[in-house]
């Protein structure tokens, strides 16, 4: 805000320092052109100027604007600029708070699943069996209870929508809740009779709707943040459970299959549903997905050994990206994109942390996973560190990715990557 105010003062100064000569408004060297260009930047006017459209740099956008298709070019450029800076060394695992999860939550095990960053800068650990939503201050590394929830897997994951509000995804609970992170107030939106294990996480789409990822439910439901209403997509999904949703710059959501065999794609502009014919085998083979700036959606294994990516720039071609070393079962749950250009699948029962290079798909084995059934999800911090969401791990850990670059707030909070 201060940066934009300073720029506006500069524009006013220029307009009063002109020698009064009238020049061609479309001459890029003219004062009128420069003044108009700067003013449009300040007020975020995206209309055409002399045949050119003003593009607002990604870090000057709000996070609610980063996933609008017209802003993808700037977002992609910013992310790839950070990628190019690389890493300063080998990753390390750090226990950032000495308290145990059990002491903080009162839950003996399986406390959290998923994490989000909020506009206030804090990390929100989302409940699985925890009776509390816990927030972490990344600067002080201290925690506090943000809200109390029933527990018993009422929710799996959540979605950061506009204005700093987190929308929890109902799993065994029939009630849709939202958490206002500006004052940590939990509010009941509405209740709907649904089947068990209803939804797993959600996606904040460019049309302002929060789409919940179907699990036990086949109906794709959404919360319209503009109208304040719950609705549903006419075409359901089929074939089983989906574990995660991935948004692309085309406004499409790719539902990642878990017990389902095919990826289902929701076009949020038409609310039509299509499928990719490639079979991922069902059988809980896969668990998560993430979009990378080169147009790939990496599909993270749970029980399978093969990593795939979907090339969204090549008619959704499914490509074999490599094999997990010493693959087992229930290996990962969640994945985070870091500013060094690497993907970090979050280990559940896999013996180690690994990284996947988003450019060449190289898989690297890192340090040991300190426990079993350990983490489910994580989120990127201000310095490229990943705050891990402890499941049965009884400790608060972060993975220092040693990224030289960092994501600005608008990119870190972007619906592309700040998700369950």
Image (cartoon, rainbow, N blue to C red):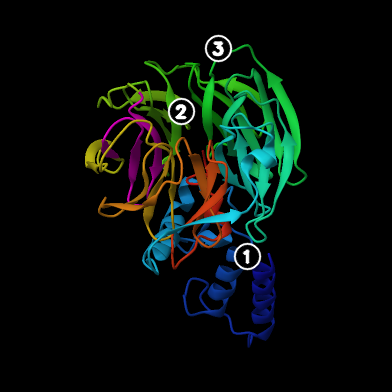
The answer for how far apart the CA atoms under marks 1 and 3 are is 49 Å
Provide the residue designation for mark 1: 42
Q: Residue 286 lies in magenta, yes or no?
A: yes
Give the residues drawn in magenta, as a range: 284-309
- Give the secondary structure at mark 2: loop
Closest to the camera, between mark 1 and mark 3, is 3
Q: Quadrant of the N terminus?
A: bottom right
Work out whether mark 1 precedes mark 3 in sequence or the reverse, and give the earlier one. 1
Work out whether mark 2 precedes mark 1 in sequence or the reverse, and give the earlier one. 1
Disc 2 packing (10 Å; few <14; some 14–19; many ≥20): few
Can you give x and y, in whole percent of width and height, for residue 376 in the image? 49, 38
| Above-or-below relation of 56 to 354 | below
Q: Residue at x 62, y 68 (%)?
A: 39
Q: Which quadrant of the view contains residue 244? A: top left
Using the image as rendered, state which of residue 411 and residue 91 is in the foreground. Answer: 91
Can you give x and y, in whole percent of width and height, for residue 332 in the image? 40, 37
Q: Residue at x 48, y 21 (%)?
A: 215
On residue 97, which mark appears?
Answer: none
Provide the residue designation for mark 2: 270
Using the image as rendered, state which of residue 236 and residue 68 is in the foreground. Answer: 236
- Give the secondary structure at mark 3: loop
On residue 195, which mark appears?
Answer: 3
The answer for how far apart the CA atoms under marks 3 and 2 are is 26 Å
Q: Residue at x 63, y 53 (%)?
A: 98
The answer for how far apart the CA atoms under marks 2 and 1 are is 33 Å
Q: Residue 161 lies in magenta, yes or no?
A: no
Using the image as rendered, state which of residue 380 and residue 72 is in the foreground. Answer: 380
Please indicate, yes or no, whether residue 357 appears anywhere in the rendered image.
no
């Amino acid at each position: 805000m201060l940066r934009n105010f300073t720029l506006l003062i500069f524009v006013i100064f220029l307009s009063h320092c002109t020698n009064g000569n009238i020049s061609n408004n479309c001459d890029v060297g003219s004062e009128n052109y420069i003044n108009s260009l700067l003013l449009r930047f300040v007020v975020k006017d995206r209309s055409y100027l002399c045949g050119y459209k003003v593009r607002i740099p990604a870090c000057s956008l709000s996070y609610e604007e980063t996933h609008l298709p017209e802003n993808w070019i700037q977002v992609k450029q910013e992310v790839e600029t950070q990628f190019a800076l690389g890493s300063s060394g080998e990753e390390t695992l750090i226990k950032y708070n000495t308290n145990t999860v059990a002491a903080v939550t009162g839950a003996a095990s399986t406390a959290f699943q998923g994490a989000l960053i909020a506009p206030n800068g804090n990390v929100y650990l989302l409940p699985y069996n925890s009776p509390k939503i816990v927030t972490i201050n990344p600067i002080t590394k201290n925690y506090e209870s943000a809200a109390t929830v029933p527990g018993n897997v009422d929710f799996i994951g959540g979605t950061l929508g506009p204005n700093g509000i987190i929308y929890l995804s109902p799993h065994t609970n029939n009630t849709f809740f939202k958490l206002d992170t500006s004052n940590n107030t939990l509010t009941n939106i509405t209740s709907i009779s649904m089947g068990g294990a209803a939804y797993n996480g959600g996606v904040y789409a460019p049309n302002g709707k929060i789409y919940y990822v179907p699990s036990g439910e086949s109906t794709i439901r959404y919360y319209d943040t503009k109208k304040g209403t719950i609705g549903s997509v006419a075409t359901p999904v089929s074939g089983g459970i989906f574990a995660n949703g991935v948004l692309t710059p085309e406004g499409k959501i790719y539902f990642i299959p878990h017990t389902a065999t095919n990826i289902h794609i929701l076009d949020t502009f038409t609310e039509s549903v299509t499928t990719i014919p490639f079979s991922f085998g069902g059988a809980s083979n896969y668990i998560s997905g993430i979009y990378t700036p080169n147009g790939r959606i990496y599909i993270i294994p749970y029980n399978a050994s093969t990593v795939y990516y979907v090339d969204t720039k090549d008619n959704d071609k499914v490509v074999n990206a490599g094999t997990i070393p010493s693959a087992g079962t229930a290996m990962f749950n969640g994945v985070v994109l870091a500013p060094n250009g690497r993907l970090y699948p979050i280990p559940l029962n896999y013996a180690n942390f690994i990284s996947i290079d988003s450019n060449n798909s190289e898989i690297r084995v890192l340090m040991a996973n300190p426990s079993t059934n350990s983490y489910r999800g994580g989120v990127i911090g201000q310095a490229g560190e990943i705050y891990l969401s402890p499941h049965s791990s009884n400790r608060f850990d972060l993975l220092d990715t040693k990224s030289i670059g960092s994501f600005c707030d608008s990119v870190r909070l972007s619906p592309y990557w700040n998700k369950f």
